[in-house]
Image: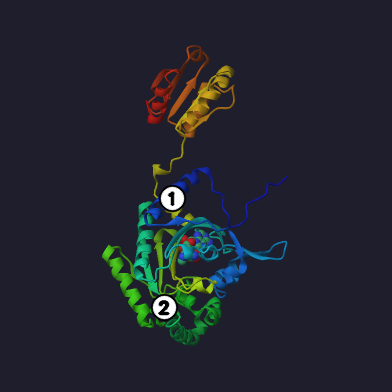
């Protein structure tokens, strides 16, 4: 029978990779906790309407990328293409806004977008997503940007560039949009078919189209930053003051508009030159009108999401992600196998990571080879002769040294194993 294949654009995370994921996840949890965040885990599937209303009908994500289906009872459901809308739904539905004036929530998990798969772009991918509700002041925009920038550096990423922009608000964006549409209409023939269509639905997206002719056509396009109202202007200025005070490098990119419709004021992206076309490791921004739009109170919000796969692909080589066991337990012969069963599990219950051999007929030579491949530095050899003397031998695979221990000296055995070398 033919084996069944993986779904296109999806990826298996194999054991040698998962150690890196654990490393990043643990570091994120610790880092975000220091900044006052706690975890929320909304479900992976939501009503389709949530994303249509939240992300915007005219976005690529809603228009062509969602995994949407009707379930057996006729409900229209979607596998989440991003986390923000679901976190807000949970924030509203569980009345979190009534508990605290400010909520800082993060979530880590899979997202689904039916995009064209390529390097750094998958149909199931993972995000580390953080949101803050209840702070209108730009100090939080700066805090969030600094937190994510420093987190990415903390896990070892280098050569990152941070770009910020302000997308205005419902007061000042309409006049910018009007001017932009007029500009784009005049250049329509030179734009790619997608952008020609976007003029009517989502004109801002034309500004960050990757097609060369579109980029050339928009060189002289009006810039959102020239249209900001007094409030948005002051917000953007103050955000920069805070970032400058902390001292991280950034640039202002007035053409960075983000792919989702809900942003107001601050938008930001962190990119790297090492990822090819899919160069964004993190994207985020403020969304002061979204909670209300989704049926909640008038509470401002801001957040970001890091692309997990992209982050992991940029991690430097490091022994920090090593998930090798500490010990390999090698029983020689059937009696030793039987007797070792209790020893092996006691070692594990004492907090040691151990692997062993389940086949009683395997030779010491083969077992040592397997021990070596497992990455364990110490091997506990349990031979039949040794068992008669109530002893075991510990071998250090790196130095070749060996030492015998009486089984009654359990404390010493554990201490040596925990030390990880002879
Ligand atoms: P986004 O820019 O759509 O924002 O996605 C954030 C990050 O997810 C991207 O920068 C990228 O690293 C990763 N990503 C997106 N699509 C893919 C894909 N197909 N394959 C691999 N990685 C991908 C959001 O999702 C917003 N919800 C972020 C946010 C939170 N804004 C405010 N709060």
- In this view, 226 is above or below 77: below
The front one of 37 and 125 is 37
In the picture, measured across the screen, residue 135 lies left or right of residue 382, that is left
What is the residue that sits farthest to the front in this orientation?
A: 98
Q: CA distance from mark 2 to mark 1?
A: 34 Å
Of callouts 2 and 1, the N-terminal one: 1
Q: Quadrant of the N terminus?
A: top right
- Residue at image location 56% in from the left, 78% down from the top: 193
Q: Is residue 193 above or below residue 359?
A: below
Relative to 232, residue 164 above or below: above
Q: Which quadrant of the figure has residue 153?
A: bottom left
Decide: few, some or many residues near mark 2? Use Cα within 10 Å; few <14, some 14-19, many ≥20. many
The answer to whether mark 2 and mark 1 are in CB contact below 8 A is no
Q: Position of residue 214 (x, y in %)?
A: 47, 77
**Res. 278 in view:** no
Residue 258 shows in this picture: yes
Q: Is residue 268 above or below residue 2?
A: below
The x and y percentages for residue 291 are 50, 70
Q: Secondary structure at mark 2?
A: loop
Quarter of the picture holding the C terminus: top left
Please indicate whether residue 345 sits to the left or right of residue 226 in the image: right
Q: Quadrant of residue 302?
A: bottom left
Q: Which residue is mark 2?
A: 168
Residue 24 is tagged as 1
**Rendered location of residue 125, percent (x, y):** 53, 57
């Amino acid at each position: 029978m033919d084996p069944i294949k993986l779904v296109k654009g999806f990826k298996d995370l194999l054991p040698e990779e998962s150690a890196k994921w654990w490393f990043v996840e643990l570091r994120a949890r610790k880092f975000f906790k220091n900044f006052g965040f706690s975890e929320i885990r909304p479900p992976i599937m939501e009503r389709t309407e949530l994303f249509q209303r939240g992300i915007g009908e005219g976005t690529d994500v809603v228009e062509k990328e969602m995994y949407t289906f009707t379930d057996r009872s006729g409900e229209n459901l979607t596998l989440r293409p991003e986390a923000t809308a679901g976190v807000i739904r949970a924030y509203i539905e569980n009345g979190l806004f009534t508990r605290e004036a400010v909520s800082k929530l993060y979530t880590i998990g899979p997202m689904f977008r039916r995009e064209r798969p390529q390097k750094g772009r998958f149909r199931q991918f993972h995000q580390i997503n953080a949101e803050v509700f209840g702070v209108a002041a730009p100090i939080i925009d700066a805090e969030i940007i600094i937190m994510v920038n420093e987190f990415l550096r903390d896990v070892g990423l280098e050569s990152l560039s941070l770009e910020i922009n302000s997308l205005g608000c419902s007061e000042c964006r309409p006049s910018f949009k009007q001017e932009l549409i007029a500009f784009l209409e005049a250049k329509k023939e030179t734009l790619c078919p997608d952008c020609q269509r976007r003029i009517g639905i989502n004109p801002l997206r034309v500004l960050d189209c990757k097609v060369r002719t579109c980029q050339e056509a928009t060189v002289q396009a009006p810039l959102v930053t020239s249209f900001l109202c007094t409030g948005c202007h002051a917000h953007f200025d103050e955000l920069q003051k805070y970032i400058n005070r902390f001292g991280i490098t950034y640039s202002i990119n007035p053409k960075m508009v983000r792919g989702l419709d809900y942003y107001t004021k601050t938008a930001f992206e962190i990119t790297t030159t090492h990822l090819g076309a899919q160069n964004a490791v993190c994207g985020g921004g403020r969304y002061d009108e979204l909670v209300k739009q989704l049926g909640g109170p008038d509470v401002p919000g801001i957040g970001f999401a890091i692309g997990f796969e992209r982050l992991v692909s940029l991690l430097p080589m490091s022994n920090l992600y090593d998930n090798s066991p500490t010990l390999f337990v090698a029983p020689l012969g059937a009696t030793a196998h039987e007797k070792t069963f209790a020893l092996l599990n006691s070692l594990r219950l004492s907090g040691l990571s151990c692997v062993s051999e389940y086949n009683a007929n395997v030779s010491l030579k083969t077992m040592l080879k397997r021990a070596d491949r497992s990455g364990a530095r110490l091997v506990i050899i349990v031979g039949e002769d040794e068992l008669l003397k109530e002893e075991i031998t510990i071998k250090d695979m790196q130095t070749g040294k060996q030492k015998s221990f009486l089984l009654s000296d359990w404390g010493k055995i554990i201490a040596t194993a925990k030390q990880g070398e002879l």
